[in-house]
Amino acid sequence: MTTPATPARTTVPAPSVREPLISGLIGGAIGAVMSAGINYLLVGMPDSEGVNAVNHAISGLMTGFLAGFAGLLAYQRKAAALARKTAAEVPPEQ
């Protein structure tokens, strides 16, 4: 029994449009709530327009980081689940 030089190819189905759309809507809603919470609880009411722009930049930065981190975790979770699924479907070689 020898190990093949190249790994076996797996076919991964193309994602549908529905999944990213739902994820985007959920992420957008969570981002809006987080941004509003950050602006209301941490930043406070601005004294001028310039301070208001800085406040929005801070909340956007924090919300973007949290969204990226959550997206990375979701991607890793889906990739691990797909790897487990394909490993379970492929019978071991004899």
Image (cartoon, rainbow, N blue to C red):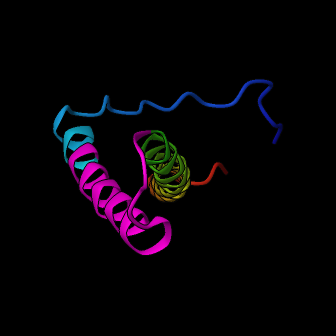
Q: Main secondary structure of the magenta part?
A: helix
Residue 9, placed above or below residue 62: above
**Snapshot quadrant of residue 3:** top right
Report x, y in % for residue 64: 49, 47
Report x, y in % for residue 73: 53, 58
> Could you tell me which residue is drawn at 49 percent across and 58 percent down?
70
Residue 92, placed above or below residue 5: below
Instruction: Using the image as rendered, state which of residue 35 and residue 94 is in the foreground.
Output: 35
> Could you tell me which residue is drawn at 55 percent across and 27 percent down?
9
How many marks on residues? 0
Query: Left or right of 23: which side holds 75?
Result: right
Report x, y in % for residue 72: 55, 50
**Snapshot quadrant of residue 44:** bottom left
Query: Left or right of 4: which side holds 51?
Result: left
Residue interval drawn in magenta: 24-49
> Could you tell me which residue is drawn at 48 percent across and 65 percent down?
43
